[in-house]
C-alpha cells in the first residue's frame, strides 16, 4: 500500500470523513433512543378517547408503524432529498419550520461563544502574566464560581434582576417583528446566561496554557532578542497558547447548541431548542428528528471549522505531523 | 580600543529556591571577556554555565532568588539596570544562541517572522521590505541553501543543523558586541557539529565583538577559542589563553579534565579515565574550595577556606592554593 503523503488536503479530507461519521452515528443513536421513550405519539396527540383505528391511521401517517431500522433508512433518504415531510400538527413542511428558527439559535449560540472568548481569553492572559497576584486570585475564584453555575439558574436570576427588578431589558421573546435593535436587546440576557459559564472555563484554560507556553524555550529566545513583552505575550505566546482553547471552541459550540434549549425555553425565544422541546412534549417525532438532525449537523460543522482553524494556527497539524484536539497532550 | 574588558564579572552568586532548599548554582564567579576574543567556558553539566549566560542577559528564571556580585558590560552595570534598559541591550548589543534549536524557535511562526522581528525589535527604522532583504542576505551568509523558500518555512520543516543556522542568523542580524553561544552543537549530530563550528569560526569576521562559547568539550573549545575559562560547581576555577591553558594547566580540576579528554582519544584499550568522587551538591554550603573533596592535592586549609582567584602568569588566573 502506498502511503499518502501527509498534507493539508489529506488532513481536510480526514476531518470531513470524521464529521460525516459523527452525523450518521448521532442520528442512529437518536433513533434507538426514541424507541426507548414510552408513549405512543398518536395516542398522545389524539387524546384518550381516540379509537384504535384512528390511532393506527395517525401512526401510519407519521410513519411510526414501520420498524426502527426502516424508519432510520427512510430518514437518511429524507436527509439526502432535503425533504423532511409535512408536520402533521401544523400542516407545514418540517424543513421550513427548522430553517425558520435556525437563525435565532445560531445568533444566540455564536454571540454566546464570542462573548465567552472575548472576555475569557484576555482574562486568562492577564491572570497568566500576573500569577498569584490579586487579579489572578480574583479571576480564579470568579471563574470557578461561574463554571459551576448551571446556565438555566443563571438565566432565571438574570431575568429577575435585569428585567423584573431593574426593568432595563425586555423579559421574553426574540423581538422577531421589531427592528434589529429590539432583536439585539432581547439577545443580551440569553447570551449572557449561556456565556457566563464558558467565560470562566475559557479564562482558566487560557491561563494554564499561557503559563505553560511562557515557560517554553522559544519564549526565552524572544526575550533574549529584546522583543517587547506585550509582543511576546500577545503574538509569540498567545498563538501557541490558544491551541487548547481553540480545541474547546469546537466542543463548546456543540454543547452550546444543547444548552441553548434551556435558554430558549426560559426566555421564550423561538429556536431549535424550543422547536425540539415542544416536539418532545407532544411526541411529534418527525419534527424532533429534523430538529436534532439540524443540531447534530451544526455540531459537526463547528467541529470541522475548529479543526480547520487549528490547522491554520499550527503548521505542524497542516503537515500532518501532529494530532488535533483529541490527540494533543 | 580601550583596555578594560568588554564584560567583567566579579563574585557573581546566584541562588535558586527549590523544593529541596536553596541551591547555590553560582558561587562567586569571576570572569573577564576581552574585546574581540572568543572565550570558551568549559565545565560539566550542572556547573552553572547556562545560568551564567542567562544572568548576563538578565533572563534568570523567576525562582532565581538572590543575585550577588557584579556584571559590568562595557560601561553598563547589568545587575543594577532597569528591565527596560536590559531589554534594549538584548538583541542589540548582546545576542544569544541557544543549546537546543529544536525548541528554541517558535513552532507556529516562520523563519522569516523570527528574523524580521529581531530587526524590528532592534528598531533600525527600516521598513519591512528592507528587513526581508537583510533576512535573506543573512540566511545566505550562514549557508542556508534556497533562502527565499526557507524564509517561508516553519521550524519543523528544517533539520536541526538548519535550525541552528537560523538561530545564528538571528544572532548575527543584531551585530552584537557580545555573542553568547550556549552549547550550540550539543543537540546536533557530529557531522553537523563540525559544520556549525566552522560557521562560528567564520562568523568571527562578521562579529566585531566578542564571543562567549559555552561547551562541555575541552577539545571543541581548544579548536575554537582564544581564551578558556574552566568552571566547576558554580565558580570559574581557572582562566587563561587557550595555548597557555593546555600547555600549562594549573588547577587540579583543569588537569583532570584534560586527562579525561586525552583518555577518550586513546585507542589502545586503556580504561576511560574519570575524576573520582561526585560533584558538589548545589544545596551544600561549602566554606572551602568546591573541588576539595575530589582533589588529590587537597590539604586541610582547602576544606575550610575558599581560595581566591589570583594571577599566576600574565592573563592566567586560577583559584587554588596549590597551583
Image: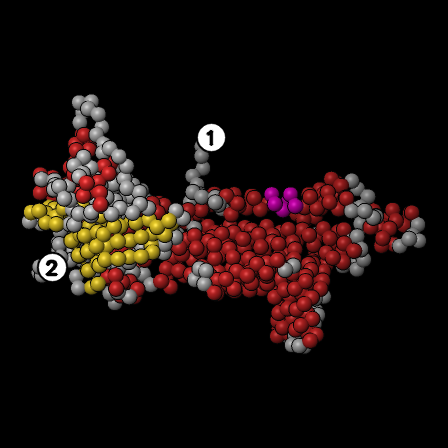
Residues flagged by tags 1 and 2 on a common chain: no
Q: Position of residue A50 (x, y in %)?
A: 92, 52
Q: Are the residues flagged by discs 1 and 2 in contact, CB closer than 8 Å?
A: no
Q: Measuring 50% from the left and 43% from the top, which residue is drawn there?
A: A327
Q: Residues within 10 Å of mark 1 (few under 14, many from 20)?
A: few
Q: Is residue A323 left or right of residue A267?
A: left
Q: Residue B71: x, y in percent?
A: 21, 58
Q: Residue furthest bottom?
A: A167
Q: Compared with residue B323, is residue A244 higher up or lower down, i.e. above or below?
A: below
Q: Is residue A77 left or right of residue B83?
A: right
Q: Is residue B130 visible?
A: no
Residue at the location (51% across, 57% down)?
A204
Instruction: Determine whether B77 is above or below A221 in the image.
Output: below
Q: Residue furthest left?
A: B314
Q: Residue at x 46, y 50 (%)?
A: A311
Mark 1 — on which chain does it sit?
A
Q: Is residue A25 left or right of residue A222?
A: right
CA distance for labels 1 and 2: 68 Å
Label 2, secondary structure: give it.
Answer: loop
Specify whether B162 is left or right of A22. Answer: left
Instruction: Tell me where the magenta segment starts and ends, as one range.
Output: A21-26
Please name the residue that numbered disc 1 is placed on.
A1
Helix, strand or loop under label 1:
loop
Q: Nearer the viewer, residue A317 or A10?
A: A317
Q: Is residue A254 visible?
A: yes
* Predominant SS of the magenta segment: helix
Q: According to the image, what is the colour scheme of the structure?
A: secondary structure
> Residue at image x 79%, y 55%?
A281
**Numbered mark located on residue B4 in the image:** 2
Amino acid at each position: 500500500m502506498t502511503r499518502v503523503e501527509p498534507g493539508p488536503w489529506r488532513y481536510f479530507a480526514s476531518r470531513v470523513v470524521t464529521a460525516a461519521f459523527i452525523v450518521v452515528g448521532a442520528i442512529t443513536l437518536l433513533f434507538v433512543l426514541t424507541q426507548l421513550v414510552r408513549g405512543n405519539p398518536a395516542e398522545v396527540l389524539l387524546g384518550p378517547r381516540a379509537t384504535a383505528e384512528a390511532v393506527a391511521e395517525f401512526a401510519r401517517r407519521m410513519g411510526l408503524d414501520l420498524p426502527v431500522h426502516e424508519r432510520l433508512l427512510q430518514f437518511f433518504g429524507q436527509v439526502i432529498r432535503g425533504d423532511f415531510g409535512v408536520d402533521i400538527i401544523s400542516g407545514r413542511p418540517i424543513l421550513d419550520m427548522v430553517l425558520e428558527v435556525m437563525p435565532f439559535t445560531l445568533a444566540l449560540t455564536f454571540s454566546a461563544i464570542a462573548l465567552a472568548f472575548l472576555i475569557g481569553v484576555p482574562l486568562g492572559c492577564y491572570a497568566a502574566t500576573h500569577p498569584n497576584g490579586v487579579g489572578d486570585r480574583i479571576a480564579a475564584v470568579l471563574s470557578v464560581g461561574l463554571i459551576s453555575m448551571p446556565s438555566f439558574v443563571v438565566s432565571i436570576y438574570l431575568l429577575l434582576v435585569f428585567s423584573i427588578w431593574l426593568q432595563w431589558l425586555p423579559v421574553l421573546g426574540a423581538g422577531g417583528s421589531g427592528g434589529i435593535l429590539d432583536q439585539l436587546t432581547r439577545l443580551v440576557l440569553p447570551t449572557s446566561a449561556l456565556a457566563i459559564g464558558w467565560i470562566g472555563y475559557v479564562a482558566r484554560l487560557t491561563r494554564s496554557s499561557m503559563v505553560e507556553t511562557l515557560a517554553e524555550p522559544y519564549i526565552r529566545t524572544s526575550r533574549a532578542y529584546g522583543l517587547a513583552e506585550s509582543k511576546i505575550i500577545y503574538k509569540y505566546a498567545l498563538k501557541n497558547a490558544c491551541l487548547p482553547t481553540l480545541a474547546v471552541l469546537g466542543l463548546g459550540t456543540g454543547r452550546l447548541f444543547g444548552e441553548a434549549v434551556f435558554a430558549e425555553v426560559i426566555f421564550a425565544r423561538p429556536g431549535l431548542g424550543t422547536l425540539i422541546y415542544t416536539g418532545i412534549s407532544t411526541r411529534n417525532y418527525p419534527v424532533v428528528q429534523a430538529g436534532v438532525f439540524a443540531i447534530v449537523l451544526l455540531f459537526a460543522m463547528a467541529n470541522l471549522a475548529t479543526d480547520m482553524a487549528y490547522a491554520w494556527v499550527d503548521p505542524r497539524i497542516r503537515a500532518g505531523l501532529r494530532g488535533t484536539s483529541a490527540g494533543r497532550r | 580600543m580601550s583596555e578594560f574588558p568588554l564584560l567583567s564579572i566579579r563574585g557573581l552568586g546566584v541562588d535558586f529556591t527549590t523544593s529541596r532548599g536553596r541551591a547555590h548554582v553560582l558561587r562567586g564567579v569571576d570572569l573577564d571577556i576581552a574585546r574581540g576574543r572568543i572565550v570558551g567556558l568549559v565545565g560539566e553539566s550542572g556547573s552553572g554555565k547556562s545560568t551564567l549566560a542567562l544572568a548576563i542577559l538578565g533572563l534568570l528564571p523567576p525562582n532565581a532568588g538572590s543575585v550577588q556580585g557584579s556584571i559590568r558590560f562595557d560601561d553598563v552595570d547589568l545587575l543594577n539596570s532597569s528591565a527596560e534598559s536590559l531589554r534594549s541591550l538584548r538583541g542589540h548589543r548582546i545576542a544569544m544562541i541557544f543549546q537546543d534549536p529544536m525548541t528554541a524557535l517558535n513552532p507556529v511562526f516562520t523563519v522569516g517572522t523570527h528574523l524580521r522581528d529581531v530587526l524590528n525589535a532592534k528598531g533600525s527604522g527600516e521598513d519591512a521590505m528592507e528587513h526581508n532583504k537583510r533576512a535573506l542576505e543573512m540566511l545566505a551568509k550562514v549557508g542556508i541553501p534556497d533562502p527565499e523558500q526557507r524564509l517561508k518555512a516553519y521550524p519543523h520543516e528544517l533539520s536541526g543543523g538548519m535550525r541552528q543556522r537560523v538561530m545564528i542568523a538571528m544572532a548575527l542580524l543584531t551585530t552584537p558586541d557580545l555573542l553568547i553561544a550556549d552549547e550550540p552543537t550539543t543537540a546536533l549530530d557530529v557531522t553537523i557539529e563540525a559544520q556549525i563550528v566552522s560557521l562560528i569560526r567564520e562568523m568571527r569576521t562578521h562579529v566585531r565583538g566578542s564571543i562567549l562559547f559555552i561547551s562541555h568539550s575541552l577539545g571543541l573549545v581548544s579548536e575554537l577559542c582564544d581564551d578558556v575559562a574552566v568552571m566547576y560547581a558554580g565558580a570559574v576555577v581557572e582562566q587563561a589563553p587557550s595555548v597557555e591553558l593546555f600547555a600549562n594547566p594549573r588547577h587540579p580540576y583543569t588537569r583532570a579534565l584534560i586527562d579525561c579528554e586525552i583518555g577518550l582519544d586513546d585507542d589502545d584499550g586503556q580504561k576511560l579515565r574519570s575524576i573520582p568522587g561526585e560533584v558538589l551538591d548545589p544545596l551544600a554550603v561549602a566554606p572551602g574550595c568546591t573541588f576539595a573533596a575530589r582533589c588529590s592535592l587537597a590539604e586541610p586549609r582547602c576544606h575550610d577556606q575558599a581560595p581566591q582567584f589570583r594571577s599566576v602568569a600574565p592573563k592566567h588566573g586560577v583559584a587554588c592554593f596549590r597551583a
